[in-house]
Amino acid sequence: MHFGVDYYPEHWDAELMAEDIARIGAMGADMVRIGEFAWHLMEPTEGAYDFTFFDGVLEELREGGLVAMFGTPTATFPAWLAAAHPEILGAGPDGLPRVFGGRRQYCYNSPVYRDYCTRIVTALVSHYADERTIVSWQIDNEFGHEGSDDCYCANCQVAWRDWLAAKYDGIDDLNRRWGTIFWGQTYNGFDEVPCPLPTITTHSPSLKLDWARFRSDSLNDFARSQIALVRSLKGPHQSVTTNLCGGFFGKLFDHRTNVADLDFVSYDNYPVWGGLVEPMEPAEIAMTLDFVRGLRRANFWIVEQLMGAQGHDVIGYLPRPKQAQMWAYQAFGHGCESMLWFRWRGMTRGAEQYCL
C-alpha cells in the first residue's frame, strides 16, 4: 500500500523542495506523483531533451525515503509544438480548431502528434528505466476528460472513413445496414460520409452510433500504443497505469478496453469540483468507485483524492471538517488500496488556483 500526494515542484522556487519533501515524509507519506504536465520543461525546444530538473527531484525523494509515480507528459504539449505543427490540434463539434492553451487539445488520430509523443516518451522512460525511485508510470492524464474524447479535425475525417472502410464490406454494405435510403442519404463511396458536425434536424442514428465507436477506438488505440511503448522501455521494477476521471457514462470510449493492458487501474476521485455548491450524493460516489473496481474486478488506486475545494477558474464546495477524510474511508471501503491526495501546495498562478 502507498500513501502520498500529487506534487508539482516545478511550480515553486527550488529552495522549497527539500522542505516540501521532508514535510511530506514527516506526515507519513511514502510516495509522490510527478511530471505529467511538464513536457516543456523536459523538451524546451524540439529534440533538446533535458531531465536535469527531475533528476534533482528524484535525488531529493531518494534522500527523503520516498518513491514516485511519474506521468508521461503527453496531455499538455509545449507551445513550440503547436506553432510548428498546428495540424496536431483537434477540432470541436463546431469544426473549429482548438487553439493552444488549456490541455488535451491534441487529436488522437494525428500521426504527427503520435510521432512526437513517441519521441518524448521514449526519451523519458529510457532515461529513468533504471531509476529505483520511480516505481510506476502513469500514461498521459485523464483520457477523454473535458470533451477531449471527441474531435472533428481533418485527421479524424480521414481516419473515420478508413475505419468505416475496414468495418464494412464496401459502401453498399454500409448503405444497407445504415438504411441510408431514408432522407436520400445514400453514399457512392466512403469519401462522401461526413463526420457528424452540426446539421439540420439530425444525422442518421447509425452514423452517430458508429461515430461513438470510432471515437472509442481512436482514444484506446492511442492509449494502448503508449502503454506498449512504456512497457517495452521501463525497468522491471516499474508498473504501468493511467488515471481515469469521472463522468464515465458521458465519455466516448470503452473504459474496460482502456484499462485492459494496465498493471492496475487508477482513478481520480472528486466528490466535488468547480461550480458545485454541494458534493455528489454518497450513493453516486459509491457507484463510481464500484464502476472502477468492476473494470478489472480488482482493487484499484486513487491517484488524485480531493482534500479541499476544487476548481479551475470557478471554485466549488469547500469540504467540511473531516468530510474529505470520510470520502477517503469510503474509497478504501470500495476497493482502493493506495491513495495519493491532490495536491501538495495549492498553485497561486494559472488555471487551478481554486484547487486547494
Image (cartoon, rainbow, N blue to C red):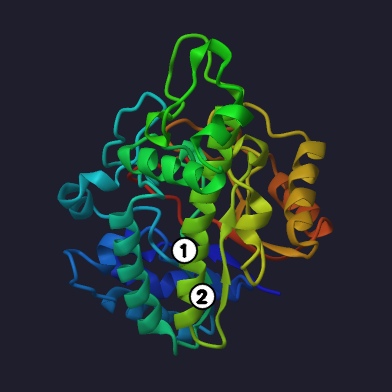
Residue beneath the point at 33% across and 43% down: 155
Relative to 151, residue 220 above or below: below
What's the residue type where badge 2 is placed?
Answer: Ala
Residue beneath the point at 56% across and 61% down: 242
Dot 2 surroundings within 10 Å: few (below 14), some, or many (20 or more)?
Answer: many
Q: Is residue 156 visible?
A: yes
What's the residue type where badge 1 is placed?
Answer: Tyr
Q: Give yes or no for contact between labels 1 and 2 (Cβ–Cβ under 8 Å).
A: no
Residue beneath the point at 27% across and 37% down: 99
Relative to 257, residue 281 above or below: above
Location of the N terminus by quadrant is: bottom right
Dot 1 surroundings within 10 Å: few (below 14), some, or many (20 or more)?
Answer: many
Between 167 and 171, which is closer to the camera in this rendering? Answer: 171
For the residue labelled by badge 1, is the local secondary structure a helix, a strand or a loop?
loop
Badge 1 is on which residue?
7
Q: Is residue 143 visible?
A: no
Please state the horizontal and vertical placement of residue 104, each as a whole percent of the image. 40, 46
State the CA–CA distance, disc 1 to disc 2.
Answer: 10 Å
Q: Is residue 2 left or right of residue 219?
A: right
Please state the horizontal and vertical placement of residue 13, each as a whole percent of the image. 29, 64
Badge 2 is on which residue?
68
Residue beneath the point at 59% across and 45% down: 253
Q: Is residue 267 left or right of residue 146?
A: right
Please state the horizontal and vertical placement of residue 300, each as a whole percent of the image. 71, 63
